[in-house]
Image: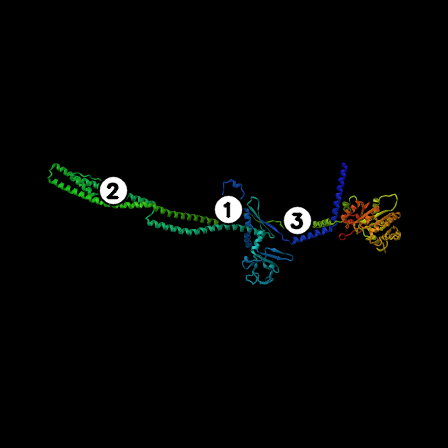
Amino acid sequence: MHTDKNEYFDSMEEENSIQLKQMMNRYLRYWPWFLITILIALFTVFAYLRYADVIYRSEAKVKLLLDKESSNFTLDVTKLFNKSNINLENEIALFKSVHLSEQVVKNLKLNVEYYYNSTVKSKQIFNAPFVVSYNDNITKLKDAIQYTIKVTPTGYTILDVLSGQKFDIKGYTSTKKIPNLPINIKPALGAIITKSIDLSYNVVLKPLNKTALELSNAFEVDAEGKDSDILSISLEGTNGPQSEAIINNLIHVFEADGITDKQEVSRRTINFVDDRFVYLRKELDSIESSKKEYKRSNNLSFIQEDAGSSIVQKTAKEQASFDIESQLLLADLLKKSIESQKAFELLPADIGIQNPTINQLVADYNTAVLSYQKLQTSAGSNNPSIQLLVSTLVSLKNNIINSVKGFRQQLKTTLVQSESAQKAADGSFASIPEKEKVLRSIERQQNLKESLYLLLLQKREEASINLAVTVANTKIIDYAITDIYPVSPQRSKIVLIALFLGMVIPFTILFIIFKLDNKIYTATDVENIAGNVPILVELPSLKEDKDSYIQNLEAFRTLAHNTNFITPYTEDQKGKVIFVTSSIKGEGKTFVSYNLATAYSHLDKKVIVIGADFRNPQLHRHLDNVSKDTKGFSNYLHDGTLQWRDLLHSNDDKEFPFDLFLSGIIPPNPTLLLSNQRFEKFINEVKEEYDIIIFDTPPTLLVSDTLMISKYADTSLFVLRSAVTEKNLISYSKKLFKDKKIINMGYVLNDIDFTSSYGYGYNYGYGYGYGKEVVKKSWFQKWKRNK
């Protein structure tokens, strides 16, 4: 059992190999088309590569930095592990903004494009021998304008492409305005204009905003990584140095724009501070004036010193009043003391009266009293000395009393003045807090304005410093560098693609044709559908002429032998009836019938070919001087007086003859005619006289004639024609066989071009040793035939 399985799988592998080889050969027979398509593809590619613009990629890398304020050292360790605070999307949008691109276009004059007119294609150049500029402001240009400029020995010939107007300019530097010509032209820096004489260039001046928009869309700006602060700026173009200059200029414009923004903030700060300075100066001057007037009107210098002075004055006034009152009390005490004396007694001396006269009088009085007391002891009252001392004491006493009265009156006057001065001092001291409050309010306003003035002065200095030292928040890692290898066209890849397309296109077309083609071509096509219905022979594509006669005969000998194998054996030794039919007309059943009869005659068989296709008779074509209306089988079946032997014809071969019974006149109702009893009688008679009876019957799909008489056949040959018979007709014929409407059936595959179908030499098989070989057809003839 294991051996059987191995043999089964080996046979399956061998069969698959054969099918794969047949499929490959089916395509390989069209190798000229593959070759032509590949050559056309390669020619197209080489022509494209010859004139295509070579695109290179230029790339620069920039690191974005944080502002100074956020770049200081910090002890917050968590910030070391966090991603950057820079919003890369905003920075990318700024790099790709039309605003920056417009600055780049202005700086590099990218809105003016130069093209060299060659014989095949105009090619953009970046080192034109002259420079074209727009007379007016370029921003006013709304639509693109184009000029063709030819350098002549004397100057330029300029053609306005849109209007067709032509201008001749003398000299190579145009500075004068020419009507209807809004451009100026001059030689490029370092260019030798005379080397470009008789050369023609196209110059296109495009609107600034449109050029900026195109450039903005051309830039590619991407982050190097998810958490990276590095941006990659790339641009593709035909000129690497030009692309590098554009990218580098974009970076500088980006930096300048950032610096300008920061400097603008500083300038606005300075301007704001300067405006506030004017206001604050006026305010401070007003406050100073108010303070000055207030101090002047209130006799203030410094409030602390003024308060101390007021206290001192108040104290002094109080002390003075106290001293005066004390003197009054002392004077009153002295007065009472002297007035209360009944005799001359001593008065208190140096009691604190601040009057030298009174003190002197008191001293003199006391001296006189002491003298009086001494004399009174020693002398009598009438003693002149005592009398003199009494007189003196009385006088001194009166003087003292009068002096005290005068002193008291003086003290009272002074006391009134002192009390008035004391009240003034008290009032001045009491008003100090109010004055201090008002003065402090004025000073508070002054201090506030002065602090604001100083703060703004500090901010102005900081803004001035920032304005002077402003730097960009970018660090250029790599300036623009152009790749050595172009982005497009990629030559090796394009050539490979061309080769691939050169093979795929014809393969695809053939594949679609093969898939859409429902015709059969080889025995494999039939076997895949027919199943167990045998294929008796594969007839090669041969012309019906003398050169192909031997090959044709050998093929039909094979068919005759194979037919004998499927024809049942009978002991009555009567002739064998063979029906040759097909699905539709044009598949070669008449051709097969005639040539099969020829093959049997070469095998020493007595053969007759009967034309049973009454609707489309073709058997007469194999005989000379015979027409379609010649009496034949239909006449015999219709006319009972006719004898079929009288209507027979013979082929032209005297050595191997066989009989032909033509179809006869086309009847109006062939089906009815074939159901005639004479048909069965005819079958029985010819079987007695002939070894092989071949019926050329009508197609089974079109009419039912063949099916109606198929019971008389010993063998049925179903003719299929390569490249003509459709695959669904195989299924139809298979069903007829399965339903036993056609018995003992075998397929005859006709008109196979073996060299085309398989791709190798099966064509020698039927001709070997029999004469002339088959003439091989050219690929064009084969393709034409298949068409």
**Does residue 233 appear to the left or right of 502 in the view shown?**
left
Q: Distance between the residues labelled 3 and 1?
A: 47 Å
First in sequence, mark 3 or 1: give its number: 1
Task: Find residue 67 and name its label.
Answer: 1
Residue 605 appears in the rendering: no
Of labels 1 and 2, the one closer to you = 2
Disc 3 marks which amino acid?
Lys
Q: Distance between the residues labelled 3 and 2?
A: 126 Å
Could you tell me which secondary element the residue under label 3 belongs to? helix
Which scheme is used to colour this image of the protein? rainbow
Q: How many marks?
A: 3
Disc 3 + disc 2, Cβ < 8 Å: no
- For the residue labelled by badge 1, is the local secondary structure a helix, a strand or a loop? loop
Q: Where is residue 207 in the image (x, y as percent from the top left)?
A: 57, 56
- Residue 219 is tagged as none
Residue that badge 3 annotates: 493
Foreground mark, 3 or 1, reads 1
Residue at 60% over, 55% down:
125
Give amino acid for label 1.
Asp
Say which of 64 and 93 sits in front.
93
Spatial separation of the CA atoms under disc 1 and disc 2: 79 Å
The residue carrying mark 2 is 323
Q: Residue 780 location, x and y as percent?
A: 75, 53
Pointer 3 or 2: first along the chain: 2
